[in-house]
Image: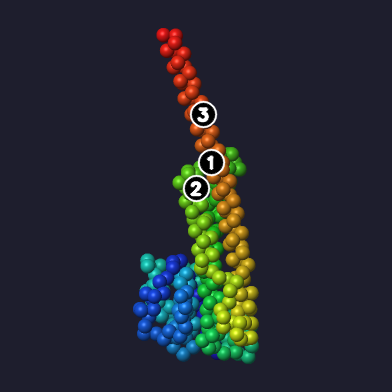
């Protein structure tokens, strides 16, 4: 049997308490403060993570589209959202390969492990995109500094860059517990093996570390830009003070001569 698993990131946080009230026609089989897991039909699941990830197993395209548009605050095309797609094959082994997940059966716990990892992976994809965007913008100013010895960046723009970088780091720390596995993975050998192989295939830990390293480099660049800008303004203030002192001296000299 071959089933499909599709993950999307809505690029916004979700209020699970409100969503739960609106999804009362579906069977809620698991819930915590950070996620909801619904059984839609037999071997058909919906997983909603509070940091904006949705994962569907064996769901029709119309249901996927309607659910995503229902949860989005502003309309977006599904093609514009970070997404991942995997096939789930039910056979005699537990294995994860490129685009394919092999399991011996599909129950609530196995679905939970698969959907949690895909939710983390697609969220990381969103953060990779945002980090790349920040890096590209800081690279523009680095090239200006290399060519001209200066850069065109105002104090307000600098503060916004620093704020975006810090918020991105905070969001990752708050949203993604990539080194943690659900308790159920520790209670069953097969679930633990599946969780490990999914994390390894999806490169969850390495991608998380890559984002952290990129953000640290961006922060270092912005700190350097900020130091240069502060020195520039300090020099300007020093010259203003010198000019004012000279003006006062000249004025005193003129008054004495008169």
Contact between labelled residues 1 and 2, with CB atoms less than 8 Å apart: yes
Name the foreground residue: 59 vs 243. Answer: 243
* Label at residue 239: 3
As drawn, is 23 to the left or to the right of 108? left
Identified at 59% across, 41% down, the residue is 147
x and y percentages locating residue 61 in the rendered image: 43, 80
Marks 1 and 3 in Cβ contact (< 8 Å):
no
Q: Earlier in the sequence, mark 1 or mark 3?
A: 1
Q: Earlier in the sequence, mark 3 or mark 2?
A: 2
The one nearer the camera, 27 or 198, is 27
Instruction: Decide: is 140 above or below 188.
Output: above
- Could you tell me how far apart the alpha carbons at marks 3 and 2 are, in whole angstroms? 24 Å
Which element is circle 1 on? helix
Classify 10 Å Cα crowding around label 2: few (below 14), some (14-19), many (20 and above): some
Instruction: Give me the disc on residue 136.
Output: none
SS assignment at label 2: helix
Image coords of residue 40 (percent x, y)? 43, 85
For marks 2 and 1, the one nearer the N-term is 2
Q: How many marks?
A: 3
Residue hosting label 2: 158
In the drawing, what numbered circle is on residue 229? 1
């Amino acid at each position: 049997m071959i089933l499909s698993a599709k993950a999307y990131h809505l690029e916004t946080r979700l209020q699970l308490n409100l969503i739960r009230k609106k999804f009362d026609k579906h069977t809620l089989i698991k819930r915590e403060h950070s996620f909801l897991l619904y059984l839609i039909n037999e071997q058909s699941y919906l997983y909603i993570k509070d940091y904006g990830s949705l994962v569907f197993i064996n769901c029709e395209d119309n249901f996927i589209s309607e659910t995503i548009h229902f949860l989005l605050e502003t309309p977006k095309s599904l093609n514009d959202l970070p997404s991942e797609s995997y096939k789930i094959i039910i056979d005699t082994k537990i294995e994860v390969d490129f685009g394919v997940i092999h399991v011996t059966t599909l129950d609530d716990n196995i679905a939970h492990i698969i959907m949690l990892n895909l939710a983390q992976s697609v969220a990381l994809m969103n953060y990779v995109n945002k980090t790349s965007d920040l890096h590209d913008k800081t690279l523009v100013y680095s090239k200006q500094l290399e060519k001209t010895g200066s850069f065109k960046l105002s104090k307000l723009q600098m503060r916004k860059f620093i704020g975006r970088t810090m918020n991105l780091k905070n969001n990752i720390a708050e949203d993604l517990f990539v080194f943690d596995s659900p308790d159920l993975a520790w209670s069953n050998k097969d679930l633990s093996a599946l969780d490990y192989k999914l994390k390894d295939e999806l490169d969850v830990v390495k991608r998380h570390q890559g984002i952290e390293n990129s953000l640290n480099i961006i922060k270092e660049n912005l700190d350097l830009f900020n130091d240069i800008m502060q020195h520039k303004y300090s020099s300007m203030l020093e010259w203003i003070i010198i000019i004012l002192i000279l003006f006062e001296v000249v004025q005193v000299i003129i008054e004495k001569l008169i």
